[in-house]
Amino acid sequence: MPVCQIKHIPVGSRLTEDVYTPLGGLLFTKGTVVEDREIEILDAFMIEEVSVEAIVDGTVITEGFADGKKQVSTEGKGASKPIRKRQSEPGIMEHLEKAVSSFKNLFQHVQGGQSIPVLEVRNVMTSLIKEVEEQSNLLFILKKADNPNNYLYEHCVGVGLLSYIMAKWMKLPEKEWMQVALAGMLMDIGKTKIDPKILWKPDKLTSSEFEEMKKHTVYGYELIKSAKGVTQGVGLAALQHHEREDGSGYPFGIKGDKIHTYSKIIAVADMYHAMCSDRLHQKATSPFLVVEQLLQDSFGKLDPKVVRVFVNGITQFSIGSKVELSDGTVGKVVFINQNYPTRPMVEINQNIINLADKRNVWIVKALV
């Protein structure tokens, strides 16, 4: 694709590659439509040229930008194909809802005494990943799918998807990505063996009921251990995803050096998705505040390396999203500084505010 000088970028053209700041932070993702504001931000970061393409009157323009001439590619008018757009949000929601519905049915089958249908679980996750893994606003779409009445099933699907993405970010061998996704999706399968009166109790659990609920980790391990098509790590993730680095977790209170890598990944994804979701006894928290909590918990509770990879990756997904600040204003996230991942640059009324410098204002809500 052609490289175009910033001063010659046609408004409405589309980036064909991710754009990074001189310090390596992601500024704009591939596919971003370049308007006047994007050009202003590129110029502010002293980025001189980017790769772009455009469609004018149905024709793909791929040449002549560098000198300001908008020449048409040799494919000719009408012969070019339109730029493939990312899956629309309604389409993604349909896939998420289908995945949640399918997992709910599978969960209920296991509750009825059947073995875990690993192939069906895998098919649910494979289909979902195929549709949504490249969505720049994926994490906020997950938030939009939030339904307290379906929380358990949505949570398992969401954690499975996040865990898959984390496995990629952590550069685990590709053959393990789906196993990590299955580990996330099946982490709470042991709850099929919990008394429904406790599992679905609308009020806060008593101490004895909570002790019973904790047993879902062991139940899950036993169920997965006898299943075919999963590795040992999947079972250990069900057993250990509530263990903590300092030994304060359950069911055995083991410390970090005894916790499987899959379990460490699922622990972070589990906490993030849970805190970002509306639950029976807890309202959702802003994703940015959740990230701050994860960073705090990386000192003793969660594996700091896993948390850092997750935070660096997760915050990049928020670029372009609308957020509400503590002073009531609404803006759009335009840049994430990896040194201050929860305090990005936000565009408000055509002005860019750097929250890393403005410490008396913070993000209270991600708008979806």
Image (cartoon, rainbow, N blue to C red):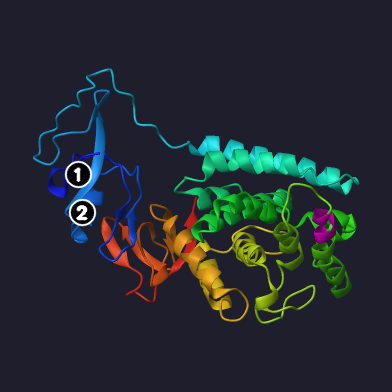
Q: At 64% across and 55% down in the image, what residue appears?
A: 180
For badge 1, the amino acid type reads: Val
Main SS category, magenta section: helix
Asked if 43 appears above or below 305 in the picture, the reply is: above
Asked if 205 appears above or below 141 in the picture, the reply is: below
In the rendered structure, are the residues bearing label 1 and label 2 in contact, judged by CB atoms less than 8 Å apart? Answer: no
Give the residues drawn in magenta, as a range: 220-225
- The number of numbered discs placed on residues in the rendered structure image is 2
Tell me which corner region of the image, top left, top right, bottom left or bottom right, holds residue 46.
Answer: bottom left
Q: At 28% across and 66% down in the image, what residue appears?
A: 23
Near-viewer residue (11 or 306):
306
Near-viewer residue (51 or 192):
51
Place of residue 196 in the rendered image (x, y in percent of width and height, measured from the top left): 88, 55
Residue 76 is left or right of residue 296, and the answer is left
Near-viewer residue (257 or 44):
257
Asked if 112 appears above or below 273 in the picture, the reply is: above
Residue 50's disc is: none
